[in-house]
Image (tube, rainbow, N blue to C red):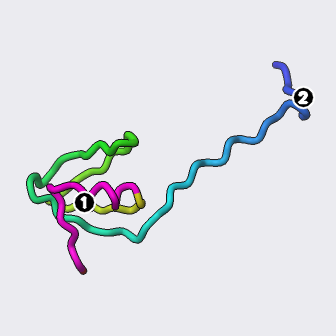
């Protein structure tokens, strides 16, 4: 088994952090259960007619989509 010299060891890439927003709940006016595929490729599940947006991208998508209405708590 060969070893990599210490001078060639690289640090793992830092994970890309998305801006997070407080969780917001939306009501799906069309379906009670489905999986949304967002433009970036992330999946967002709808269960019991509800979906939670936890990032800015999700919040923007759900705010502009006509099938969803934001619930106030």
- Is 16 situated left or right of 43 in this image? right
**How many residues crowd mark 1 within 10 Å: few (<14), some (14–19), many (20+)?**
many
Q: Badge 2 local density, few (<14 within 10 Å), some, or many (20+)? A: few
**Relative to residue 22, is residue 7 depicted above or below?**
above
> Residue most toward the top?
1
Furthest residue in direction left, as rendered: 30
Q: Are marks 2 and 1 in contact (CB under 8 Å)?
A: no
Residue positioned 35% across, 42% down in the render = 39
- Tag 2, which secondary structure? loop
Please tell me the numbered disc located at residue 5: 2
Q: Position of residue 70 (x, y in %)?
A: 22, 69
The residue wearing badge 1 is 51
Structural distance between the alpha carbons of marks 2 and 1: 49 Å
Q: Quadrant of residue 63?
A: bottom left
> Which of 68 and 7 lies nearest the eye of the viewer?
68
The residue that appears at 43% across and 67% down in the rendered structure is: 21
Point 41% across, 60% down: residue: 56
Task: Let me know if residue 66 is in the magenta part.
Answer: yes
The image quadrant of residue 62 is: bottom left
Q: Nearer the viewer, mark 2 or mark 1?
A: 1
The x and y percentages for residue 73 are 24, 80
Disc with the residue nearer the chain's start (2 vs 1): 2
The total number of labels drawn is 2
Q: Quadrant of the N terminus?
A: top right
55 within the magenta span: no
Residue 49 lies left or right of residue 21; in this view the side is: left
Q: Dividing the picture into quarters, in which one does residue 40 lie?
A: top left
Left or right of 57? Residue 48 is left
Residue 12 located left or right of residue 50: right
Q: What residue span does the magenta drawing correspond to?
A: 57-72
x, y percent for residue 54: 39, 62
């Amino acid at each position: 088994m060969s070893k990599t010299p210490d001078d060639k060891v690289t640090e793992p890439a830092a994970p890309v952090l998305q801006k997070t927003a407080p969780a917001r709940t939306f009501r799906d006016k069309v379906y009670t259960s489905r999986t949304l595929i967002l433009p970036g490729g992330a999946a967002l599940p709808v269960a019991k007619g509800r979906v939670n947006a936890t990032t800015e991208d999700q919040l923007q998508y759900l705010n502009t989509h006509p099938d969803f209405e934001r619930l106030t708590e």
